[in-house]
Image (cartoon, rainbow, N blue to C red):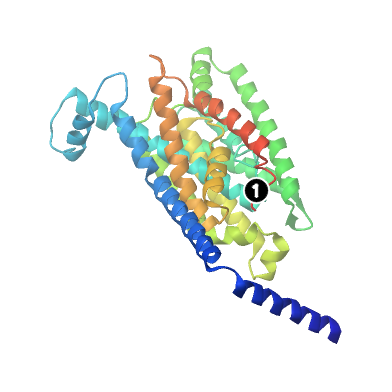
Amino acid sequence: MEEMGSSACRVEVTTLFKQEEAPAVTRASHGRRTAGTRGKKRLLTALIMVSPLLAAGVALFLGAYGVTPLQVVQILATPLSGIDSPESAIVLDIRLPRIILAGLVGMSLATSGATLQAVLRNPLVDPFILGISAGAAFGCAVSVGFLPGVSLQLMSFIFGSLAVIMACAMARSGGEISRLSLVLSGVIVSALFTALLSIIKFLVDPMKLQSIVYWLMGSFSLADWPQVKSSGIGILLGCLPIFLLRWRLNVISMGDEEARSLGVNVSRKRVIFIAGATLAVTSAVAVSGIIGWIGLMAPHLVRMLVGPDHRRLIPLTMAGGAAFMIAADTVARNLSSADIPVGIITALAGAPFFIYLMRRGGAESWGK
């Protein structure tokens, strides 16, 4: 043992001498590389944080009715001036609420995706996998088809929450919820509500069926200020606990045993995070329909750029998801004379992205 200890000491001393003998130029170049990497990360962080504003600024003057950037600035500078013009109505009553709503929905889907990926330690989990979106969509379809007097947001939240409760109940074993079982249960629940949704579409009045089918594709064509207010409250209330407790996601993503050894109540925190994600997603689905891929793409893109630390990842994913959704909706309403559902645009962007991610080995390197 003493010989082993002395050998280890000799190795350490030798290493220290080698480090001391290393050329100063090498140490300086390493320092420059480290500083350069930090500088790039700071720049990327700043760009991602301002990206929603940049995307919104471009979206305000792009559309079928031409509005110049100068006119947009003048209208936004004096929104309460009382000037009644076609340009003012287009910017303040049509485009601005649509852009804000798109940003809120993108933020909620991206944040929920990043949260569920950390909580379940699975890089391919999103709100659709757990059945949240399918349950919320079913609730909204019931409201549109058979209960027009009932709030879409209320029905979305009720059935989205029901889907999560069913998935958690199916995954519970011995008082604990297995991560793998929860994902599998979510797939089953999602399939169940998708089947029920198909029954609704079969039974509903043909005139209402058209509205349901178009809404399910995902669109912000009916966005207005009341929708921004009603959905914004639910989205912000859902995202707030995730943002405030985001550092706990670093611990939970290490594994249940490691988290418990650090004094974290894993089950309680998991419930809080899943509940927040459910509220945010159901509030979004109620006003936008089903829009896929945002909950997968945005967290992965941000993670590839700034790393897996959720203290940075969550706020940057919020900003990145909002910017991506605003950009996708801008493309959707400018690509043709018809208002293309934004869900089509996100799907067209999502498929190539995941082909790239698979070839790059992103799923295997997640969290490294």
Residue closest to the eye, 109 or 324: 324
Q: Quadrant of the N terminus?
A: bottom right
292 relative to 61 in the view: left or right? right
Residue 80 higher or lower than 253, as above or below: above
Which of the 4 image quarters holds residue 348?
top right
What x and y, as percent, mark residue 52?
A: 38, 41
Which of the 4 image quarters holds residue 88?
top left
Residue closest to the eye, 241 or 162: 241
Residue 120 higher or lower than 149, as above or below: below
Residue 342 higher or lower than 116, as above or below: above
What x and y, as percent, mark residue 203?
A: 60, 18
Which of the 4 image quarters holds residue 252?
bottom right
| Amino acid type of the residue that numbered disc 1 sits on in the rendered structure | Trp
Local SS, label 1: loop
Can I make out residue 162 in this image?
Answer: yes
What x and y, as percent, mark residue 194?
A: 65, 28
What x and y, as percent, mark residue 19?
A: 62, 72
Q: Residue at x 67, y 47 (%)?
A: 365
- Residue tagged 1: 366
207 relative to 195 in the view: left or right? left
64 relative to 185 in the view: left or right? left
Residue closest to the eye, 189 or 139: 189
Q: Residues within 10 Å of mark 1 (few under 14, many from 20)?
A: some
